[in-house]
Amino acid sequence: MGRSVMIAVAAVSLTMATGASYATSYCSEPSPPSCLSYLAIGEPDEFTFSMCRSSMVSYQRDVSEFQRCVKSEADDARRHADDVVEEYNRTVKKFNCVARREVIC
């Protein structure tokens, strides 16, 4: 097997080995409550104001959850990138060993 073929095989193997193990979740960005448009129009009654306040509390909770989710995805992506680099380094080390025709790689 020629050296250029070995590099191509190593690159494909690296992609397959690392790509399949990385899956992302989806962080759903929350939307502001629509009730704010109703409150801005005129004098809301107590029930409307109370419902909108509940929606704002839910929105606050959703924003916090979205923030946690995005941070978690970023952490996962960073770990995945580190794993890919480690796999690349191992592959290069093995390739160089084979290229030097060492007996044990």
Image: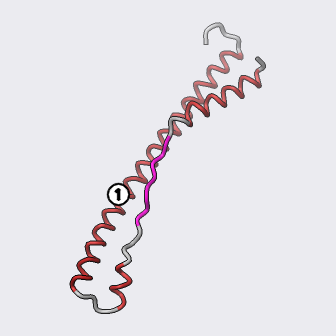
Q: Is residue 14 magenta?
A: no
Q: Residue at x 36, y 81 (%)?
A: 36
State left or right for residue 11 relative to residue 23: right
Residues in magenta?
Answer: 23-30
Q: Residue 11 appears at what percent x and percent y? A: 66, 30
Q: Residue furthest front?
A: 47
Image coordinates of residue 40 in percent, x first then y, are 36, 87
- Residue visible at 28% across and 92% down? 43
Q: Residue furthest bottom?
A: 42
Q: Nearer the viewer, residue 79 or 23?
A: 23
In the depicted structure, whether residue 70 falls above or below residue 100: below
| Residue at image coords 54%, 30% | 86
Q: Residues within 10 Å of mark 1 (few under 14, many from 20)?
A: some
Name the quarter where the N terminus is drawn: top right
In the figure, 93 relative to 77: above or below? Answer: above
Magenta span dominant secondary structure: loop
- Image quadrant occupied by the C terminus: top right
Furthest-top residue in view? 103
Q: Is residue 25 magenta?
A: yes
Q: Position of residue 2 (x, y in %)?
A: 78, 19
Q: At x 61% / y 34%, what residue is drawn?
A: 15
Q: Is residue 77 left or right of residue 68?
A: right
Residue 63 image position (x, y, % from top left): 36, 63
Residue at numbered disc 1: 65
How has the structure been colored for display? secondary structure
Q: How many marks?
A: 1
User: Judging from the image, what secondary structure is the residue with disc 1 in?
Assistant: helix
Vertical side of 97 occupied by 27: above or below: below
Amino acid identity at mark 1? Glu
